[in-house]
Image: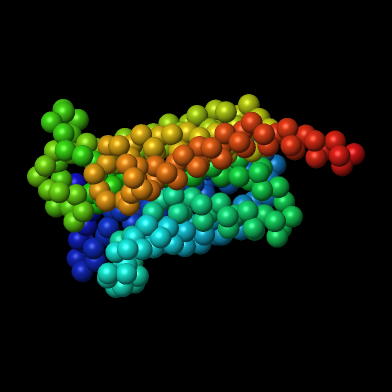
């Protein structure tokens, strides 16, 4: 695929464009839905800024953790900011920063968590299209009809038919976004939309990892992302099953 588009002296990178579009699309979706649910748009902007900051920090920190042995051998990786960003780190970092912001503003984190997560899936879908243009996060070799061939990628092996894991991930993210929006329209209890995202994304990511062929760190037979996926799915299941009941008990106790 193509990633670099030269326009005169300026080179536009499709990966960066898709990431930016993902942020803007997510923000637009959240703002549009916030009025429908009676939520404060100012709080939403604050969460957005915190989530972006936390996400950027989280993607980098998790990369450092995963690549710690390589960093010991080559410390220059610490300041190589052209590469080295882990999606799960961004999710975890964004959620944590958003949580502490809501605590500071004394608003319900779960309500905004539910609002934001469908938009996160939308942003991830667009971001994975950026991966497709750049050729990163590539799949295993295949002879199947759906295989794709990269010609000028700095990441994927060129001139070899590969499983289009980027497109599979992107389609899955868009599907998750749609399912969450449909479920949210039913006005479920606080926390359940977000917990459903954790379960759906975690399961999808776990299986897509079997199709990928780029190095992502490993623990035994599992990639680092698969191990994190198990924890994410477990956390989502606990939230979905336990948290609504806990909230109900707290509401009774406050009467």
Camera-nearest residue between 42 and 207: 207
Is 15 displayed left or right of 225 in the figure?
left
Q: Is residue 156 above or below residue 142?
A: below
Q: Tell me the quarter of the image containing the C terminus.
A: top right
Can residue 217 be seen in the rendering of this structure?
Answer: yes
Across and down, in percent, residue 115 comes to 60, 42
Across and down, in percent, residue 97 comes to 58, 58
Choose top left, top right, bottom left or bottom right for residue 144.
Answer: top left
Name which residue lies at 70% across and 56% down.
Answer: 103
Q: Is residue 40 above or below residue 171?
A: below
Name which residue lies at 32% across and 52% down.
Answer: 217
Across and down, in percent, residue 14 comes to 28, 53
Name which residue lies at 16% across and 34% down.
Answer: 142
Is 222 displayed left or right of 135 in the figure?
right
**As drawn, which residue projects farthest toward the left?**
159
Q: Is residue 22 above or below residue 188?
A: below
Name which residue lies at 39% across and 54% down.
Answer: 86
Can residue 35 be seen in the rendering of this structure?
Answer: no
Across and down, in percent, residue 194 comes to 57, 39
Is 251 displayed left or right of 20 in the figure?
right
Choose top left, top right, bottom left or bottom right for residue 96.
Answer: bottom right
Q: Is residue 39 above or below residue 144?
A: below
């Amino acid at each position: 695929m193509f990633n670099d588009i030269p326009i005169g002296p300026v080179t536009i990178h499709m990966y960066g464009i898709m990431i930016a579009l993902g942020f803007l699309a997510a923000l637009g979706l959240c703002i549009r839905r916030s009025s429908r649910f009676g939520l404060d748009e100012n709080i939403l902007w604050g969460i957005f800024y915190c989530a972006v900051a936390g996400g950027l920090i989280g993607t980098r920190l998790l990369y450092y953790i995963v690549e710690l042995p390589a960093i010991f051998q080559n410390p220059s990786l610490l300041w190589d900011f052209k590469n080295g960003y882990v999606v799960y780190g961004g999710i975890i970092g964004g959620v944590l920063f958003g949580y502490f912001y809501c605590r500071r503003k004394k608003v319900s984190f779960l309500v905004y968590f539910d609002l934001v997560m469908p938009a996160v899936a939308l942003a991830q879908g667009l971001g994975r299209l950026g991966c497709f243009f750049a050729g990163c996060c590539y799949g295993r070799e295949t002879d199947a009809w759906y295989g794709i061939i990269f010609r000028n990628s700095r990441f994927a092996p060129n001139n070899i038919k590969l499983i289009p894991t980027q497109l599979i991930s992107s389609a899955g993210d868009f599907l998750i976004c749609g399912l969450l929006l449909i479920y949210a329209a039913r006005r479920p209890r606080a926390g359940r939309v977000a917990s459903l995202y954790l379960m759906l994304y975690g399961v999808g990511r776990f299986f897509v990892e079997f199709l990928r062929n780029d190095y992502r760190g490993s623990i035994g037979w599992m990639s680092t992302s698969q191990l994190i996926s198990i924890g994410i799915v477990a956390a989502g299941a606990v939230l979905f099953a336990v948290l609504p009941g806990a909230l109900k008990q707290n509401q009774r106790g406050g009467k």
